[in-house]
Image: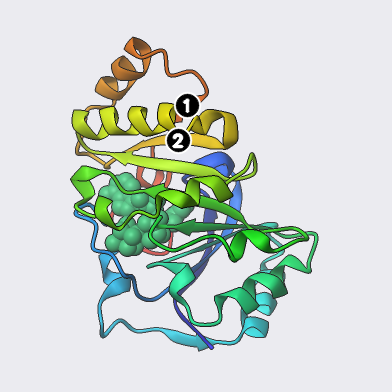
Amino acid sequence: MFKVVEKFISINGEGRLSGQLAVFIRFAGCNLDCSFCDTRWANEKDVDYELMTKEDIYKYIKFTKVKNITLTGGEPLLQERIMELLEYLSKDEYLLVEIETNGSIDLKKFSRIEKNRPKFTMDYKLMSSNMEDKMVIDNFKYLNKNDTVKFVVGTIDDLNKAKYLIDKYELTNKTNVYLSPVFGEIDMNEIVEFMKNNKMNEVTLQIQLHKVIWHPDKKGV
Ligand SMILES: C[S@@+](CC[C@H](N)C(=O)[O-])C[C@H]1O[C@@H](n2cnc3c(N)ncnc32)[C@H](O)[C@@H]1O
Ligand SMILES: Nc1nc2[nH]cc(C(=O)O)c2c(=O)[nH]1
Ligand code: SF4
Ligand SMILES: [Mg+2]
């Protein structure tokens, strides 16, 4: 059984599928406590959730008739039998499943799903998150062109570290690389100037589209 705090259809506001319809399954609980977390409510010990089986989740997804699925949270890979869910969903070739994961969970076993492997959007938490020491650097090697590394940046120091990691691990040759501002905390022009000054080709700047369409704190979107 999986602890689902919310499930909804929306426009994906992040990453490569931003702007497209997606079904969101948000799981309860997280092992990190990022300074900027915009979904802290999902990680509270007493958060309300519905218990769903993998079949319940699949039935809900098919009922929506939406192709893109984002498994998120909280930290989705902490769910005890998440591997069973991923393998179950991967059998449906029509679905495009992506996982928003926080960089602290070893991705090795998940990257081994053969057919129609879910796509990782792996956050690398930088200094301003206060969670950088939890990052599993080895994860970079399990990411491919279907996946994304996302750097949520709140300061110039974060930007400098992101650039250092992008260069050191040649991330733009391996996977998609996104910079995302800590919403409302950093002047996006500063990020653009940094990208221009550092000739950051093949890096994508995103803004969380759902926070532009709706109030930034609105749930279920
Ligand atoms: C709430 S997290 C859930 C998935 C997973 N725990 C993670 O951190 O990737 C989903 C995404 O929202 C991003 N996020 C959370 N709070 C944010 C904020 N205040 N500004 C920008 N992005 C934020 C995270 O970095 C992550 O990419
Ligand atoms: N619209 C919308 N798009 C999203 N993409 C990733 C999200 C997340 O919280 O993981 C998210 C979210 O919370 N809402
Ligand atoms: S890892 Fe994700 S859900 Fe957990 S605290 Fe950080 S942003 Fe929030
Ligand atoms: Mg969100």
* Numbered-mark total: 2
Q: Is residue 213 above or below residue 41?
A: above
Q: Is residue 37 left or right of residue 72?
A: left
In the displayed structure image, the side of residue 45 where residue 25 appears, left or right: right
Q: Is residue 26 left or right of residue 187?
A: right
Q: Look at the image and tell me in which quarter the N terminus lies.
A: bottom right
> Between disc 1 and disc 2, whose residue precedes?
2
Please state, as top left, top right, bottom left or bottom right, where the C terminus lies in the image. bottom left
| Amino acid type of the residue that numbered disc 1 sits on in the rendered structure | Val
Give whichever of 207, 217 is nearer the camera.
207
- Identified at 34% across, 33% down, the residue is 162
Classify the position of ligand 2 by quadrant: top left, top right, bottom left or bottom right: bottom left
Residue 178, disc? 2
Asked whether the residues under the numbered discs 1 and 2 touch, taking CB atoms below 8 Å apart as contact, a structural biologist would say yes
Residue 18 image point, x, y percent: 53, 42
Q: Residue at x 52, y 60 (%)?
A: 107
Q: Could you tell me which residue is drawn at 38 percent across and 34 percent down?
A: 165
**Where does residue 63 sit, x and y in percent of width and height?**
70, 72
Amino acid carrying mark 2 in the image: Tyr
Give the left or right position of residue 93, taking residue 136 as reference.
right
Label 1: state its secondary structure: strand
Disc 1 from disc 2: Cα separation: 6 Å
Label 2 residue SS: strand
Crowding near the residue tagged with mark 1, few <14, some 14–19, many ≥20 C-alpha atoms within 10 Å: some
Name the residue rendered at 70%, 57% in the picture.
Answer: 67
Residue 109, can we see it?
A: yes
Between 193 and 114, the residue placed more toward the observer is: 114
Residue 159: give x, y in percent of width and height. Answer: 28, 30
Residue 203's tag is 1
